[in-house]
Amino acid sequence: MFNPEAWRSPFSAELTPLHVLPTFSETDLLGCERPEVVRSSNNFHLHELFSKGYTVLPGAVPTSVCDRLAELIDPATALENPHDVWVEYDDPEQGRIYGVPLSQQVVERSQCRYRGMDLYRNQEAAIEACYAPALRELLIAALNSEVLAYQQLAFTYGSQQALHQDPMYVRVSRPLKLIASWIALEDVKPDSGELVVVPASHTLRQLRFNSSDDAQCQQVFTGGERSLWWNNHDQGAHSARLSQLQQLAYAMGSRVYRPAKGDVLIWSSQLIHGGSPVQLRPDGSRPTRRSLVTHYCPIDTVPMYWYQDPHTKPVSPYPYCHLTWKLLPRFRYPVGFHPDLYRERHQTDLRSEAWAWQDPALHYALFGKQEGRAAA
């Protein structure tokens, strides 16, 4: 059973000394299992991800891909074919609404705070963006694994979300093996609700919630009464945490992010970040801040999202499998991998599990590669 209490980084203080806050010995970084790899790497972005908690890949996503996605979530064009984009939003009377087609009613009732959900389910451009070559290369280096992309959010306008840390809301079976990307689908302008990040805030001690009544926590954590996950109903604890993060951001200093179209911001799980206020234009219109957020974890990690998302069901036949893993084979087959030969070489083991025989490439990625099995 994975126990985050025992998961420590031996080098976080060396990389990012915190002068304005007490020194914390309890820290968690993505590279804590292999700090020597980070130290010896000549990849600037990998170093920056571990030292600052985020890094930027300029122009990593082609502008043509950005334009295709921006058109999908722009009400002026999306409403012509609303079933291509499904959204969630906060209705003023009914609360959170999940998994409905983008429509004029959604735009009006959400007051422009709707989020396109999981565009990769039917839009190849969304997969091309979240698995852009430079982005995927960095993710693999940081997580030391092939990666799953999940819980993808497409924003037309700034979210104005309070400063937070992703593990509060984004649950995976290894809570700190989580990275997110934020792709600018247009040049981001001032006062459009830009993203705000707090450099090096991922090195702070873990801030935990009382999760004693949370069934998922009991399954995933040893000692699940104290976890990184908010239990979704203790509003007092939630408000106190947001206030605490705001104070930490004030003490450490924050930065406003204004990228160009195609730039990608990548951050580690514990980085404090949020959305800045949106300022309406003189004519009363709201500036857009079209962007695509995707969450990632190692392929042997389970996103809890697939157990609770109501409009995109979990891919149950394949353990640890994600929708994008199945959609485009070019993102998942290793060089030189031949599924029929792999089946023939290892048919006894693969036939014992129906999913493994159906998808030998997934078996190789999860088990075969680590066991030294031949790919062909």
Image: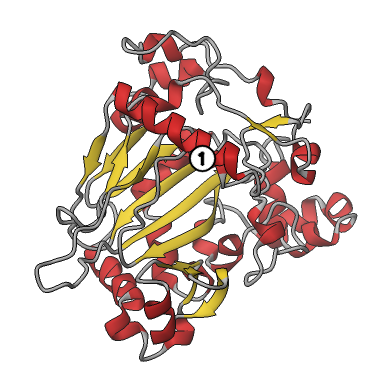
226 versus 98 height, above or below: above
- Specify the quadrant of the image occupied by residue 188: bottom left
Q: Answer few, some or many: residues within 10 Å of disc 1's Cα (few below 14, many 20 plus, some between 14 and 19).
A: few
- Where residue 40 appears, as percent x and y from the top left, is 39, 17
Q: Which of these two is toward me, 43 or 344?
A: 43
**Residue at horizontal 38 percent and vertical 40 percent from the top:** 273
**Residue at horizontal 36 percent and vertical 51 percent from the top:** 182
Look at label 1 and name its amino acid.
Answer: Ser
Residue extending farthest left = 282
Q: Quadrant of the N terminus?
A: top right
Kindly identify which residue carries mark 1: 239
120 versus 343 height, above or below: below
Q: Is residue 136 visible?
A: no
Q: Is 215 positioned to the left or the right of 185 in the image?
A: right
Q: Is residue 281 visible?
A: yes
- Specify the quadrant of the image occupied by residue 254: top left
- Where residue 104 appears, as percent x and y from the top left, is 38, 86
Q: Name the element at disc 1.
A: helix
Q: Which of these two is toward me, 266 or 213?
A: 213
**Residue at horizontal 35 percent and vertical 77 percent from the top:** 72
